[in-house]
């Protein structure tokens, strides 16, 4: 008899959980039993969870609206600053004035990049943007990233070399076609930025059973071992590169994008001996 009562209680609890998962939970008539007390507490928990979910969704909407407003409100002033700066560059200026115009344009571009990075970061952190992984040809995608980085590489007198791959063995991964190039591009940009003039950044696609990925290796300044755990932190910049351009969000965004799709990033580096970043994505 006792066993059948317990079985009945377990069945009632199981039904209660099933209805909760289906969003159809309703408290039965209260009869002062322990199971009835549990139903009361469970109803309160579900009500609190729904309230919390609504608050989170409202907060996401507010953040999305704020980010959109910031993006729109700053776009025109920045565009005007850059326009008038470029017009000033075309004027006959003395060396000191020309130098100040160059500084204005350089800082306006830095501010534009910072705002864009903050917008992307906010969208990822607030859950406004959801990744849409789909089958992608990783080799073709990597070639596009390398091509997009060529102009930047030329500015730094650095070359980008992508290793040849077997055309017959396509490497297919599941990734977001918009955000994955952003992650790879940020890592490639860092490699170019910290490489010495005349050096080469080597890029290759590799493939394993469960993961495939992209390796980006440079011959730059390298990363001290004690700093490697910190380089993916938001706004982190080593004291050794304070004189280089950048705001410290590129690697942070790269990791958020890759891990958000079920992948990960591996770093092998040594101070003064270059760095090798490997981005792994699920096949």
Image: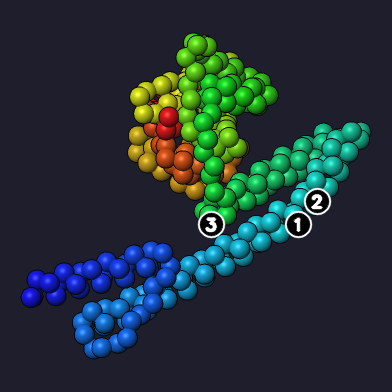
Looking at the picture, the colour scheme in use is rainbow
**Label 1–label 2 contact, CB within 8 A:** yes
Instruction: Tell me where residue 84 appears, x and y as whole percent.
Output: 86, 43
Real-space CA distance between mark 3 and mark 1, rounded to the nearest whole angstrom:
21 Å
**What SS does tag 3 mark?**
loop
Q: Residue at x 57, y 26 (%)?
A: 141
Q: Which residue is mark 2?
A: 76
Residue 57 occupies quadrant: bottom right
Q: Nearer the viewer, mark 2 or mark 3?
A: 3
Q: Residue at x 23, y 89 (%)?
A: 32
| Residue 241 versus residue 111 in the image, above or below | above
Task: Of the two numbered discs 2 and 3 on the same chain, state the one appearing first in sequence.
Answer: 2
Q: Nearer the viewer, mark 3 or mark 1?
A: 3
How dense is the environment of label 2, judged by Cα within 10 Å: few (below 14), some, or many (20 and up)?
Answer: few
Q: Which residue is mark 1?
A: 73
Residue 282 visible in the snapshot: yes
């Amino acid at each position: 008899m006792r066993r059948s009562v317990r079985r009945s209680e377990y069945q009632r609890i199981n039904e209660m959980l099933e209805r909760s998962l289906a969003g159809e939970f309703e408290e039965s008539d209260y009869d002062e039993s322990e199971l009835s007390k549990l139903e009361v507490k469970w109803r309160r928990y579900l009500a609190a969870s729904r309230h919390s979910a609504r608050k989170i969704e409202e907060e996401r909407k507010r953040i999305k609206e704020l980010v959109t407003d910031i993006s729109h409100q700053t776009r025109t002033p920045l565009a005007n600053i850059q326009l008038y700066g470029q017009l000033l560059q075309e004027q006959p200026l003395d060396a000191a004035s020309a130098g100040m115009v160059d500084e204005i344009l350089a800082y306006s571009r830095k501010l534009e990049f910072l705002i864009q990075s903050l917008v992307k970061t906010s969208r990822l952190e607030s859950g406004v943007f959801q990744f849409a992984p789909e089958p992608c040809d990783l080799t073709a995608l990597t070639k596009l990233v390398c091509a997009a980085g060529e102009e930047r590489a030329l500015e730094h007198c650095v070359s980008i070399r992508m290793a040849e791959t077997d055309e017959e063995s396509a490497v297919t991964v599941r990734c977001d076609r918009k955000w994955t190039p952003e992650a790879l591009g940020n890592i490639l940009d860092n490699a170019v930025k910290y490489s010495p003039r005349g050096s080469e950044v080597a890029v290759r696609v590799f493939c394993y059973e469960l993961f495939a990925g992209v390796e980006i290796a440079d011959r730059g300044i390298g990363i001290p071992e004690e700093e490697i755990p910190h380089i993916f932190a938001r706004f982190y910049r080593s004291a050794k590169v304070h004189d280089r351009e950048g705001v410290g969000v590129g690697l942070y965004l790269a990791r958020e994008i890759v891990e958000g799709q079920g992948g990960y990033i591996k770093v092998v580096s040594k101070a003064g001996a270059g760095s090798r970043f490997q981005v792994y994505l699920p096949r």
